[in-house]
Each structure stands twice: as structure tokens, then as C-alpha cells.
Image (tube, rainbow, N blue to C red):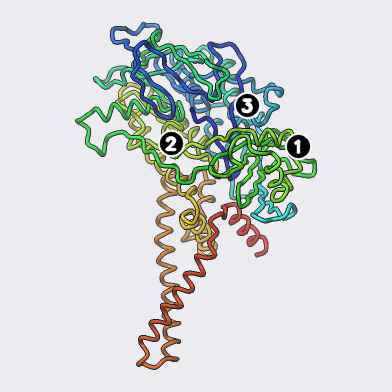
């Protein structure tokens, strides 16, 4: 299944199934669908449940009318912003082509379309995303349909309804997070193209693209096979898209930009191509690094109507011993979309659970939210099938193939949508690619553009995924790789801000920093902190040893060693017994926030 569904547990991104689209451009398709490429001869291979089959078009030639300077695969936020960027940067005489296998976007101005808040996943645009949208003249239109989030309110496990901790973001941020449904962002970008750039950009919905030749035979253009798709089997739980590749046409592109998200049609072909190329050294071969998800979670969505005495510009979050709930505003009227994040084996995570059991748990542990959910909606939540978050992946050691193909966004770096890193870094990719294209003076086929983009962003893709994965390790491993460093960073930064950087969240909120530089600085801090802690504990041990030596005779060496070892084991055991594997970052941030207020 295409991984359109995402979720945030720390205030920036909520994952929700996408709704039906409006309009009649080509074939309207669901946005949570399988893709089946139908052919009389099939040799299917699959990745992420997308079935790819050969089309047998060996003797076909490309129609001259189907030659384009730029072809973009993917019509999501990254794909449409890429099209806008290319049109404004290159000013090509022939229209830029965009292909997307799904349906046209929804009308971003029609309130009735967005009334069911659980049908759309919400994204939070931070400084990185806002700068990219502003750069290409669409931010004002996007901001007009957003809702500002200025802080968060968190309930720790076992906290009462009146014990939530509110934290308003301060001067550490140079931007105000703006939240909107992902599909609404697509709708605004689509609207801008229709109104301002319709003579330069041609968008084709309901088409599947399969790469036929990525220029492996030399420095020639990219050849793509494009198939018309239709929705099939509407009653099936997993909607399917049928693409007739026997009737496919060939399209030629001077430059191919892949923005097809977790579908990775182009990235998979790049990987397969490099595997066949025996001339490449192992370290230079393109590959997709796929991490096993060792902290798998499922989620269910919950509509919430906040009362008038609750703030409507906060992210609300609560944690229990079984699941978390996070909620972001779907509009400025108090309509929120909440997400229940559960372990996969939890009884409440299954479909068709007893709504009475779910209600009982809410009443006992989340009474502040239970009162906002009526019995009918509680039954709907209990009946829902669970959805899954995407797994961490990145491509390396480059983001390009030969001289004319380049990857941007989720197909280059896929993260669980925590902390607003995924969508915003995808938009930042487009901004960087735009800068490179501007310097190329319109020469997009000599390989320098894609190579320079890879130089600037390939290491960023890897660092982004590695940082994000370290924030998502399970249990006590997560405490050691995430919670403990977060606390230590905050302490050392407070004691010596000129030597030690802020914690990872403080650095991620600084859109002027690259992910690679953040990762490098944190490694330096870890070494410095280890040295400082080693000196501290060494001094304490030496003083303790000196004190014991005065109490024991010089002949009591064995006794001293036994006592010292016993004391060390006792303190170490007490320390680990205090580690709570269910602790969440919001709990730590809330405690640190309280300390700052009382300081």
C-alpha cells in the first residue's frame, strides 16, 4: 500500500487517510491505493506493495510531441512545488510535464470538503518549508488556509485532567508553525499552477510512470513509459489502481525529477540499474538503505471538538501506559484531529474492538479527552482498522543517476513524520535544486546540475534519517540514545552555552543549520560530555577512595575492593531501575520547562 498515511507524536505531523478528490481531469483515483500494472505478459516484482511489470515496448519510438525539457513524477507537495520552481527558474518554451497516479487535488477553499477532519493528514510547516514556499511566491496563499500552532500542552502518564503542562514556544524559534491538511497544500499549489502557470506546466492525473531508459547507454535523454490508470474493486478494503501498460506511450525528458514519495519507482530502477553495472565499485553503487522497524506502532484517528475554554492554537498530547494521543488543529474553530498511537500487539489496536473497553480506558486514563468523544464516534474508532507508519529509508551515496535523473523528497529520505522533518525537508530539497538550476543558466543536460544537487543534499538525506531513527528507538535503548542525551545536552548547554550546543530539538528548530552539521556537532558534544563526565566521576571516585583508605588499614586491600565494587554495583543498579522505558520526550521537555520557569 502506498504510504500516504503518517502521524506525529510530537506536535508537527498527523497521519490520516486521504479523502476523495474533486474534478474530472483524467481518472479519479483513491490516494491510499495499490498499483497493478496490467499486461498480457507479466513478471512482477514488488516494493511497498506496488507491482511493476514489463510492458514489452521494445520497438516503440518516442513521439516528438512527447519530448519535454523536464518531467516530474509525483504530484504531491514536493512534485508541484518542483514544477513551479522549474517554470519560474527555467522559463522553458515547452510545458513541463507532471505525472501522478492519483486523482486531482481537492478545492482548498471549499470548507465543506474539509469538514471531516479525520480524512486528511495534517502537516506542520516550519521554517524550512515556509522559506521554500515563500521563495517561489506561494506562501501567502498557503498561509491563508493554515492554522497557527504557538505551543503545546502535555499530560504525563498518571497525570490528572488539570495537571497538563502548557509550554508556549518562545524566541528560540524564528517562525510560527502553520498547520494544514497535506491535500490542502497540494490544492493551493495546484490552484497556483492553474491560475499563474498553466501555459508552462501540464499536470496529468491518473497515470503510472515506468522508467525504460535512464540514460544508461550514454548521455542521452530519459525515456519513460506512461500508462493510463483506473480504479478497480471499490468494495475491496485496499483500493487498487489498474494501469494498462499495453496501451502505454513513451515520453522523453531532458531531465527527470522523481518526487513520487515512498512509491520509489525511479529510485528502485536506479538501484536495479547500478546492481547490473559491473564497472561501478561497490562503494559507488546506488542503493536504498531500508531499516527494520524495531519500534513499530499503529495508529487510529480521532475527531475532537475542543470546548471554548481550551486554547485552539496548541498541540495537545497525553501519554498513558498503553498508548499516546496527540492532536493538532484542523482549523481555527476548535476542530482537532487526534491520533491514537499504540503498540501493534495491544488489544485496543485491533479492528472491531469493543467500544466499551476503549471508553473505559479513556475514562480512567484520559478523561479530559473522553468527554470530547461521543459514543457513536467511540464506536467508529474501535471499529477502525489500524494504520501503520512508514519505515526509515534513505538512498546513497548520491541522489542522481547518470546526467539527467534526480530524486527529491520522501523517495530520497523517508522518515516517520515526527518533529516535522519529512515534509519540510522535502520542500527544502526543492529550494536547493532551484538554486542549482539558477546557476546552470538553463543547461540541464550536462550532468552538472544533478551532480551538484547530490553533493549538497545526499549527506543531508542520510543524516536526516539517522537523526530521526535515533529519536525512535524502543524501550531502554531509546532512553540511552534519546532521552538521556536530551537531558545531558540541556544541562551542559545551560552550564556552558559557549562550549556545548542546545539539545537536538533546539538545533532542529534552527532552519539555518543543516542536518549534517547538527549530527556532526552532536557527535562532538558526546565526546566532550563523556570526557567531562569521566573527569567528574573519576574525581568523585578518587575522593571516595581516599576517604575509605583512611577508614581501612593498609592491609585491608581486599576489603576495600569488595566495598568499592559493591557500592558501584548498587549505584548502577539503582540508576537503571529508575529508567522508565515508557518515558516520552514531551515529559522531559515539560520538566525542563518547569525548571526554567522556577529558576
Q: Residue furthest left?
A: 279
Which of the two discs, 3 and 2, labels the residue nearer the N terminus? 3
> Tag count in the figure?
3
Residue nearest the observer in this picture, 351 or 336: 351
User: Tag 2: Cα neighbours inside 10 Å, few (<14), some, or many (≥20)?
Assistant: many
In this rendering, would 593 be left or right of 376? left
Q: Which is closer to the viewer, label 3 or label 2?
A: 2
Query: Of helix, strand and loop, which one carries label 3?
Result: helix
User: Tag 3: Cα neighbours inside 10 Å, few (<14), some, or many (≥20)?
Assistant: some
User: Residue beneath label 1, please?
Assistant: 374
Q: Residue 581, position in %: x, y?
A: 53, 56
Residue drawn at (51%, 70%), measured in percent from left and top? 574
Residue nearest the observer in this picture, 262 or 534: 262
Query: Of helix, strand and loop, which one carries label 2?
Result: strand
Q: CA distance from mark 2 to mark 1?
A: 39 Å
User: Residue beneath label 3, please?
Assistant: 141
Q: Give the label on residue 413, or none.
A: 2
Query: Of helix, strand and loop, which one carries label 1?
Result: loop
- Image quadrant where residue 69 sits: top left
Q: Residue 556, position in %: x, y?
A: 37, 90
Q: Quadrant of the C terminus?
A: bottom right
Q: Which is closer to the viewer, label 2 or label 1?
A: 1
User: Tag 1: Cα neighbours inside 10 Å, few (<14), some, or many (≥20)?
Assistant: few
Residue drawn at (47%, 58%), measured in percent from left and top? 480
Residue drawn at (53%, 42%), measured in percent from left and top? 344
Q: Residue 314, position in %: x, y?
A: 68, 43
Amino acid at each position: 500500500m502506498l504510504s500516504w498515511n503518517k502521524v506525529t507524536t510530537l506536535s508537527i505531523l498527523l497521519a490520516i487517510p486521504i479523502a476523495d478528490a474533486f474534478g474530472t481531469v483524467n481518472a479519479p483515483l483513491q490516494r491510499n491505493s495499490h498499483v497493478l500494472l496490467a499486461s498480457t505478459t507479466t513478471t512482477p516484482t514488488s516494493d511497498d506493495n506496488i507491482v511493476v511489470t514489463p510492458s514489452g515496448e521494445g520497438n516503440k519510438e518516442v513521439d516528438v510531441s512527447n519530448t519535454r525539457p523536464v518531467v516530474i513524477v509525483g504530484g504531491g507537495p514536493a512534485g508541484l512545488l518542483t514544477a513551479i520552481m522549474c517554470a519560474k527558474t527555467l522559463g522553458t518554451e515547452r510545458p513541463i510535464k507532471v505525472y501522478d497516479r492519483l486523482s486531482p487535488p481537492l478545492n482548498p477553499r471549499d470548507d465543506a470538503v474539509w469538514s471531516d477532519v479525520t480524512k486528511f493528514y495534517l502537516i506542520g510547516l516550519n521554517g524550512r518549508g515556509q522559506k521554500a514556499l515563500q521563495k517561489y511566491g506561494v506562501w501567502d496563499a498557503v498561509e491563508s488556509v493554515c492554522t497557527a500552532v504557538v505551543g503545546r500542552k502535555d499530560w504525563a502518564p498518571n497525570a490528572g485532567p488539570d495537571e497538563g503542562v502548557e509550554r508556549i514556544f518562545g524566541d528560540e524559534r524564528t517562525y510560527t508553525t502553520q498547520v494544514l491538511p497535506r491535500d490542502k497544500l497540494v490544492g493551493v499549489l495546484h490552484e497556483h499552477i492553474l491560475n499563474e502557470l498553466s501555459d508552462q506546466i501540464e499536470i496529468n492525473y491518473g497515470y503510472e510512470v515506468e522508467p525504460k531508459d535512464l540514460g544508461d547507454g550514454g548521455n542521452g535523454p530519459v525515456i519513460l513509459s506512461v500508462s493510463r490508470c483506473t480504479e478497480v474493486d471499490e468494495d475491496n478494503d485496499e483500493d487498487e489502481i489498474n494501469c494498462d501498460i499495453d496501451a502505454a506511450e513513451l515520453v522523453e525528458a531532458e531531465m527527470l525529477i522523481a518526487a513520487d514519495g515512498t512509491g520509489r519507482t525511479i529510485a528502485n530502477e536506479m538501484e536495479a540499474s547500478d546492481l547490473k553495472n559491473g564497472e561501478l565499485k561497490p562503494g559507488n553503487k546506488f542503493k536504498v538503505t531500508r531499516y527494520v522497524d524495531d519500534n513499530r506502532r499503529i495508529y487510529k484517528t480521532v475527531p475532537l471538538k475542543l470546548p471554548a475554554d481550551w486554547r485552539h492554537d496548541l498541540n495537545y498530547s497525553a501519554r498513558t501506559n498503553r498508548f499516546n494521543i496527540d492532536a493538532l488543529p484542523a482549523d481555527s474553530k476548535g476542530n482537532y484531529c487526534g491520533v491514537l498511537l499504540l503498540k501493534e500487539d495491544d488489544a485496543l489496536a485491533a479492528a472491531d474492538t469493543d467500544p466499551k473497553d476503549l471508553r473505559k480506558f479513556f475514562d480512567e486514563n484520559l478523561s479530559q479527552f473522553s468527554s470530547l468523544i461521543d459514543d457513536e464516534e467511540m464506536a467508529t474508532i474501535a471499529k477502525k482498522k489500524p494504520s501503520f507508519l512508514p519505515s526509515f529509508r534513505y538512498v546513497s551515496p548520491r541522489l542522481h543517476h547518470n546526467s539527467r535523473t534526480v530524486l527529491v523528497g520522501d523517495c530520497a529520505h523517508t522518515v516517520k513524520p515526527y518533529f516535522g522533518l519529512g515534509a519540510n525537508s522535502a520542500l527544502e530539497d526543492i529550494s536547493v535544486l532551484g538554486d542549482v538550476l539558477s546557476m546552470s543558466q538553463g543547461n540541464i543536460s550536462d550532468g552538472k546540475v544533478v551532480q551538484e544537487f547530490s553533493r549538497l543534499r545526499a549527506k543531508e538525506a542520510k543524516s536526516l534519517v539517522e537523526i530521526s531513527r535515533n529519536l525512535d528507538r524502543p524501550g531502554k535503548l531509546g532512553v540511552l540514545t534519546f532521552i538521556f542525551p536530551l537531558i545531558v545536552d540541556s544541562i551542559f548547554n545551560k552550564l556552558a552555552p559557549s562550549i556545548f550546543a542546545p539539545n537536538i530539538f533546539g538545533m532542529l528548530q534552527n532552519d539555518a543549520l543543516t542536518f549534517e552539521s547538527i549530527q556532526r556537532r552532536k557527535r562532538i558534544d558526546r565526546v566532550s560530555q563523556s570526557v567531562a563526565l569521566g573527569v567528574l566521576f573519576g574525581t568523585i571516585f578518587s575522593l571516595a577512595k581516599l576517604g575509605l583508605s583512611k577508614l581501612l588499614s593498609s592491609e585491608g586491600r581486599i576489603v576495600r575492593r569488595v566495598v568499592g565494587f559493591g557500592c558501584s554495583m548498587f549505584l548502577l543498579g539503582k540508576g537503571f531501575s529508575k529508567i522508565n522505558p515508557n518515558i516520552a520526550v514531551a515529559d522531559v521537555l515539560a520538566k525542563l520547562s518547569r525548571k526554567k520557569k522556577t529558576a
